[in-house]
Image (tube, grey):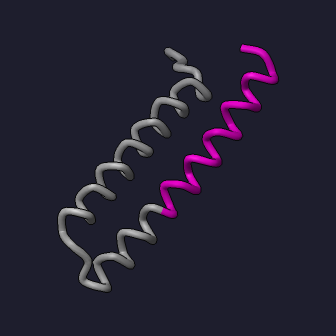
Amino acid sequence: MSEQEQADLRLEFARLKQDHADFDAAINAMIATGCDPLQIQRMKKKKLAVKDRLTRLEDRIIPDIIA
């Protein structure tokens, strides 16, 4: 993997990490205001999708080394 690809992956990882934190804050705000449980569940599903993407990116950034 080239240095540019590595840098792009790290940048996307940082952006997704921020998105994940934003979803967390939004969900907490929705819970605090007594928002519709279905909307909260949808937000949690989107947050989980971001988390899954973060995991896949992390696997690409950090090579799997067999010791």
The residue sitting at the bottom extreme is: 33
Residue sitting at 27 percent across and 55 percent down?
A: 42
Q: Position of residue 2 (x, y in %)?
A: 78, 16
Q: Which quarter of the image is occupied by the N terminus?
A: top right
Q: Is residue 42 left or right of residue 16?
A: left
Based on the picture, tell me whether residue 15 belongs to the magenta stretch. Answer: yes
| Residue sitting farthest toward the left | 37
In depth, the one of 6 and 45 nearer the eye is 45
Query: Which stretch appears magenta?
Result: 1-22
In the rendering, at what x and y percent does residue 35 appear?
Answer: 26, 77
Q: Splitting the image into 4 quarters, where does residue 65 fall?
A: top right
Q: Position of residue 52 (x, y in %)?
A: 40, 38
Residue at 74% x, 22% y is: 5
Seen at 48% across and 55% down, the residue is: 20
Between 41 and 3, the one lying in front of the other is: 41
Residue 67, magenta (yes or no): no
Residue depicted at 18% across the width and 69% down the height: 37
Q: Nearer the viewer, residue 16 or 63?
A: 16
